[in-house]
Amino acid sequence: MGESAAGRILRDRTAGLLLTSVVVSGFGSSAMSLAAGIWVKSLTGSDSLAALALFAVWLPVLFGPALGAVADRLPRKPLLAGANVVMALLLTALAAVDPSGRIWILFAVLLLYGAASVLMDAAESALVAQAVDARLLGDFNGLRMMANEGVKLVAPLTGAALCARFGGDAVALLDAASFALAAGLYGALRVRGPAPAEVHRPSGIRQVWGAPALRPLVLAGSVTMLCAGLNGAMLYAVVDGVLGRSPAYAGVLYAAQGIGSVAVGLLAAPLLRRMPERVFAAAGITVFAVAVGLRALPYDTVALTACALIGVGLPCVLIAAMTAVQRETPDAVLGRTSATAATLMMAPNAVALALGAGLLALVDVRVLLPLVGAVALLTAAWLLTGRQGKTPTGPRASAAEA
């Protein structure tokens, strides 16, 4: 037997550098995402402003299509290297300025941080499709998911510890170092190709909606992430009201979910080679749906198992959708299409966090969780039984079939 696809990716210099950059930048970003709220809380004493810190980072996701269009009009490698350098300098400057009396400075940086993340995600997705063999995109995206989730097991705790011991500026410097290192990794890539040509470019929405292979996956991803947001909003209600534990126990449940996500990152590529993307996504949504319902049971073992299963099931639709976007979308519009797909799938998660908080005031969590699981289960059934579109023969389809 020949070398595995994952082995070929790890041995490939370009793919290896791309994966390393994901780990490096992901570590800094994960540390900063938690530390930002702690930093604001320590400076202002306000829980509301601390919550707004995370919202400031998420807000630019709503403008993903526009930021993706920018990524389509610029050469991807210089854009990624340059954006990482700019963010490294910006965070270094933030660490050097005391924002205690000018909290708006910190919020402005967090907004720019979120916008840069969306822009770089779009450019990176397009660069991956350009640099990685189409037959190996599923392997790469699975490994990328594994790396992202593995980092999340360590980085937030590191950021919180640094923030508590040395202050938020220490986390800003850590993140600046991660951006600087990522810039060097992107600069070392050997990716050829001119800047995207000035041609007619349909919008990302039109590209997603008009592609039979993409539309159902993105729609299913949107509903699933809405359910994921509702599930996330109920975390502390489960910890306290169902399990009778202290709020700190939420960290244990987060860790269990992270372990599940790391596992599916390893399994995604082999499974995607053995089943259609819609089947893979539907299977993952089904696992997620059952696990959400199980969280209503008042047993620690069941809760830990359910969280691990959520970690296994939830990423499947995201991996399937983004792999399909990379394979089926023309290069000239890949940045805006990937950003649009990400916006359509991730924005419902943010909306559901607020919606879930309101529902908890009206309905018992033991009732809400099975209802959310049922909605996800119906989504999986629709994805499996809905009208199948023809498989596109786009610019990457022929390579995928080779």
Image (cartoon, rainbow, N blue to C red):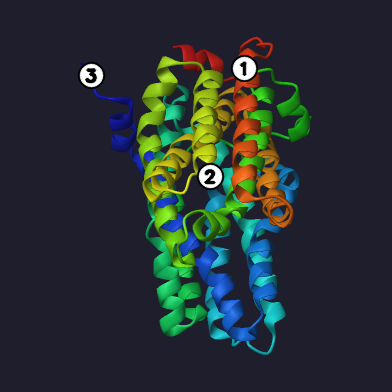
Is the C terminus in the top left, top right, bottom left or bottom right quadrant?
top left
> Which badge, 3 or 2, is on the more N-terminal residue?
3
Type of the residue with mark 3: Gly
In the orientation shown, which residue stands out farthest toward the left?
Answer: 1
Instruction: State the SS at label 2.
Output: loop
Residue 118 shows in this picture: yes
Relative depth, front residue between 110 and 178: 110
Q: Residue at x 48, y 34 (%)?
A: 313
Type of the residue with mark 2: Ala
Residue at which label 2 appears:
296
Q: CA distance from mark 3 to mark 1?
A: 28 Å
| Residue 160: percent from left, percent from top | 45, 72
Instruction: In the rendered view, tell whether residue 60 sits above or below residue 192.
Output: below
Is the N terminus in the top left, top right, bottom left or bottom right quadrant?
top left
Instruction: State the SS at label 1.
Output: loop
The image quarter containing residue 132 is top left
Point out the frontmost of discs 3 and 2: 2
Residue at which label 3 appears:
2
Type of the residue with mark 1: Gly
Relative depth, front residue between 52 and 300: 300
In the orientation shown, which residue stands out farthest toward the bottom?
Answer: 101
Residue 392 shows in this picture: no
Residue 168's mark?
none
Residue at which label 1 appears:
394
Rate crowding at label 2 as few (under 14), some (14 to 19) or many (20 or more) other CA atoms within 10 Å.
many
> Which badge, 3 or 1, is on the more N-terminal residue?
3
Instruction: In the rendered view, tell whether residue 295 sits above or below residue 171.
Output: above
Instruction: In the rendered view, tell whether residue 61 sits above or below residue 244.
Output: above
